Image (cartoon, rainbow, N blue to C red):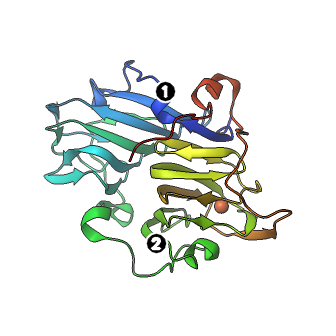
Amino acid sequence: MPRSHIEFIHSNSMPWVKKHLDPLFKNVIYKTLSLDNDTKEMTAVLKFPKKWNQQKPSSLTVDEEIYILSGSININNIQLDEGSYSYLPAYYPRENFFSKNGAEVLSFFSGKISYTCDFKKFNKNKLIEKISLYQDGWDKNYIGINSPEIASSGSRKKLLRTDPYTGDQTWIMGVIPSYQEKKVESHPVVQECFILSGEIEGNCGTMVKGSYFWRPRDILHGPYGTKTGCTILSRSKGGKLIVDYFDLDKPFDFNSRHNVVVPDKLLKYSRKKTRKIIY
Ligand SMILES: [Fe+2]
């Protein structure tokens, strides 16, 4: 079964799983945010302990897309600190791979996680060793992501990746405080988001730091608004993001109802947050 519509869960409410993930990630604990039971594509938060070290040069047989939520990891002497992004194609060799001080990492795997020491050629067109939001800053404009309502609000974006074959994209949105949408929208592609900071409310309720959704294509959503502003890591799957807008029946207000769409087994991780987070 492909991935279920999950909109939304709070990853911070989920327990860490200690069950073995893969030899490459020995002693790394994790939370599975969503999983495709057919392709085994997976989105997860991984927690590396301090002084973690993968002793042997190794690689994965699937692509891994990485964003560092906190702490740092080091792959092939490239230090990935908080706010760093990387795209490692299948069979990209990790000559050394360690975390000195521990890390929490948002990882997107393109299939069943599987370790190998058999180094085949990897696809250099897909490799992104490092992009850092904190070191490199926002893009100068909103070109490259089709999201006119956010773009025209003065919000910012950082485009991290456009897949050279599928057009799938990954980017970070920096939505300005007091942003309020005037339309609802849908996309003919899957959209997947993780809230990195701040909070934002919409037709499913209020998402806060650590909230996550996986939304299948063609689902009407919004309008969204944020008092605090927020930073969101976002991916499109099935091609570039295209936005179809529809007029609102009633204007946006900051009194959204909690109305999540999640499989029963995840309901306990998607309860309304009654306490505001402290920034
Ligand atoms: Fe959207």
Residue 61 appears in the figure? no
Q: Secondary structure at mark 2?
A: strand
Rate crowding at label 2 as few (under 14), some (14 to 19) or many (20 or more) other CA atoms within 10 Å.
many
Where residue 208 appears, as percent x and y from the top left, is 51, 45
In the picture of the structure, the residue carrying the numbered disc 2 is: 156
Tell whether circle 2 marks a residue whose Cβ is less than 8 angstroms from ligand 1: no
In the picture, measured across the screen, residue 129 lies left or right of residue 98, that is right
Instruction: Classify the position of ligand 1 by quadrant: top left, top right, bottom left or bottom right.
Output: bottom right
Q: Secondary structure at mark 1?
A: loop
Residue visible at 75% across and 69% down? 244
Residue 56, label in figure: none
Between 170 and 93, the residue placed more toward the observer is: 170
The vertical placement of 253 against 158, above or below, is: above
The vertical placement of 15 against 1, above or below, is: above
Rate crowding at label 1 as few (under 14), some (14 to 19) or many (20 or more) other CA atoms within 10 Å.
some
In the picture of the structure, the residue carrying the numbered disc 1 is: 14
Amino acid beneath label 1: Met
Q: Quadrant of the N terminus?
A: top right
Amino acid beneath label 2: Arg
Q: Are marks 2 and 1 in contact (CB under 8 Å)?
A: no
Between 35 and 201, the residue placed more toward the observer is: 201
In the picture, measured across the screen, residue 74 lies left or right of residue 121, that is left
Residue visible at 67% across and 54% down? 254
